[in-house]
Image: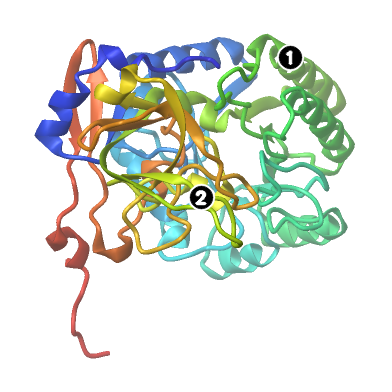
């Protein structure tokens, strides 16, 4: 495993006493190092990395991303506005913030119009909405390349079962409708996911370059091509880490090859996804109890470590069967490993952190904790706090930034007042 955070260096007990549990801890030095690696990967005039705000939209994370020279991929109007608050430039020249969606929702269309954001069109009907709203500017087009998916099948980002992007059979119609509306198509985008096998990623990226090479002659105004697909990240102990040196030649070849086809420079954009933020964070919970079931004709028995974090805080294991390494802080840390199921406080059978993508319970080995010990879920920086919720009226967990040996609260725990603030009784 690419060990991300050494939990012995943080004052987790002291932080827990101050902000309560559960809480997120972000290590700024790890984030800066990851961003530095990605900046080196995309060094060059015609290469640019975009940070997917959906992975982590904390203001301090966005600030560090901006300082590292990254651009933004936003998928809602409010993400665009949060990027603006974090200091990212608005406008389409250059398109520092890209709005990518298959549907305009809430304030998204208004934000695109008011701030001159480049819309990345994922459904043909979005062209009609843009035209009807009086938009007069360039667009990007998200293509469904016909292949590609993420670490599990439910993360299908390309192919016939994917909702994302415009299918090849519909591209001619989109090109004609964009021309009629006088929307120059200045960027092409596709997303093929990380893939379940580590070297599948760069193989898919090369295949995606082939796709764009075939498409490019049909788009005379294109200035950029976006190779969407998150760089693999090793969540499991012993998993191989993806070597960014494998990816750099793909990008350089893409820039040269597509520029040669187009007869002009083509900017190659990448979306490294979770790679930048996954390993910077811990979700810290407190052990509340340990209880046991015994085997019967319905199945095997288990010992359950009950903690105060649940899928309201980190939904990935419940949603995808995703793996997060587990550590104990306290008396249990020095004891022999035993198999445990880790479960949360919610009145839902799926509120379990130790399950697989078939929804089966998979015990984890670690030292037997005592009630009151801290239990740490590693690599929780991507799609952790960003996907948290107020289910059963629980407040979202606080976020703590660890920087240069000091802890700073960057998002407090939500209160009931925060949760009910939008409730009203207004006549319509």
Which one is in front, 268 or 249? 249
| Number of other residues with Cα within 10 Å of mark 2, as a class: few under 14, some 14 to 19, many 20 or more | few
Of the two numbered discs 2 and 1 in the rendering, the one whose residue sits closer to the viewer: 2
The N terminus, quarter of image = top right
Q: Residue 147's quadrant in the figure?
A: top right
Say which mark, if any, is on residue 252. 1
Residue 413: x %, y % from top left = 18, 46
The colour scheme is rainbow
Closer to the chain start, of discs 2 and 1, is 1
Left or right, 241 with respect to 301, comes to right
Check residue 216 in the rendering and tell me which mark sits there, or answer none. Answer: none
Callouts 2 and 1 close, C-beta under 8 Å: no
Q: Quadrant of the C terminus?
A: bottom left
Please identify the quarter of the rendering in which residue 203 is found. Answer: top right
- Observer able to see residue 396: yes
Q: Nearer the viewer, residue 47 or 289?
A: 289
On the question of residue 264 being in view, the answer is no
- Which residue: 18% across, 84% down? 425
Give the answer, above or below, for where 243 lies relative to 220. above
Above or below, comparing residue 234 to residue 131 in the picture: above
Q: Position of residue 379 (x, y in %)?
A: 45, 28
| Residue in view at x 53 percent, y 15 percent | 2
Q: Position of residue 304 (x, y in %)?
A: 40, 45
Camera-side residue: 205 or 118? Answer: 205
Tell me the distance, in whole angstroms, between the alpha carbons under discs 2 and 1: 54 Å
**Position of 240 compared to 371: left or right?**
right
Which residue is painted at 65% across and 12% down in the image? Answer: 243
Badge 2 element = loop
Which is more toward the observer, 188 or 419? 419
Q: Residue at x 48, y 57 (%)?
A: 350
How many marks the image carries: the answer is 2
Residue marked by disc 2: 301
């Amino acid at each position: 495993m690419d060990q991300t955070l050494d939990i012995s260096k943080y004052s987790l007990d002291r932080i827990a006493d101050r902000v309560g549990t559960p809480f997120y801890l972000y290590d700024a030095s790890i984030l800066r190092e990851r961003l530095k690696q990605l900046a080196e990967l995309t060094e060059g005039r015609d290469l640019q990395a975009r940070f997917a705000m959906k992975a982590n939209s904390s203001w301090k994370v966005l600030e560090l991303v901006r300082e590292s020279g990254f651009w933004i991929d936003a998928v809602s109007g409010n993400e665009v506005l949060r990027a603006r608050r974090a200091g990212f430039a608005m406008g389409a020249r250059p398109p520092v913030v890209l709005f990518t969606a298959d549907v305009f929702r809430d304030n998204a269309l208004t934000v695109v119009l008011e701030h001159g954001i480049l819309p990345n069109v994922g459904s043909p009907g979005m062209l009609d909405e843009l035209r009807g709203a009086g938009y007069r500017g360039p667009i990007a087009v998200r293509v469904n390349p016909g292949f590609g998916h993420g670490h599990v099948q439910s993360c299908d980002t390309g192919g016939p079962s994917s909702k994302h992007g415009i299918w090849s059979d519909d591209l001619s119609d989109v090109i004609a409708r964009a021309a009629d509306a006088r929307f120059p198509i200045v960027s092409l985008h596709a997303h093929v996911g990380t893939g379940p096998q580590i070297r599948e990623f760069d193989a898919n990226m090369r295949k995606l370059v082939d796709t764009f090479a075939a498409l490019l002659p049909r788009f005379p105004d294109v200035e950029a091509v976006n190779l969407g697909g998150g760089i693999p990240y090793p969540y499991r102990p012993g998993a191989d880490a993806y070597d960014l040196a494998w990816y750099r030649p793909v990008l350089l070849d893409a820039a040269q090859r597509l520029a040669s086809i187009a007869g002009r420079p083509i900017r190659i954009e990448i979306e490294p996804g979770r790679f930048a933020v996954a390993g910077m964070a811990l979700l810290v919970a407190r052990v509340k109890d340990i209880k046991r079931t015994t085997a019967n004709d319905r199945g095997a028995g288990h010992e359950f470590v009950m903690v105060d974090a649940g899928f309201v805080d980190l939904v990935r294991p419940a949603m995808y069967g995703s793996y997060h390494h587990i550590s104990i802080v306290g008396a249990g840390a020095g004891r022999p490993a035993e198999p445990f199921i880790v479960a949360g406080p919610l009145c839902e059978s799926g509120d379990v952190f130790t399950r697989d993508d078939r929804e089966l319970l998979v015990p984890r080995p670690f030292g037997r904790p005592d009630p009151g010990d801290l239990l740490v879920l590693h690599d929780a920086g991507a799609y952790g706090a960003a996907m948290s919720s107020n289910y059963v009226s629980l407040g979202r967990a606080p976020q703590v930034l660890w920087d240069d040996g000091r802890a700073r609260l960057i998002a407090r725990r939500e209160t009931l007042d925060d949760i009910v603030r939008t409730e009203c009784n207004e006549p319509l």
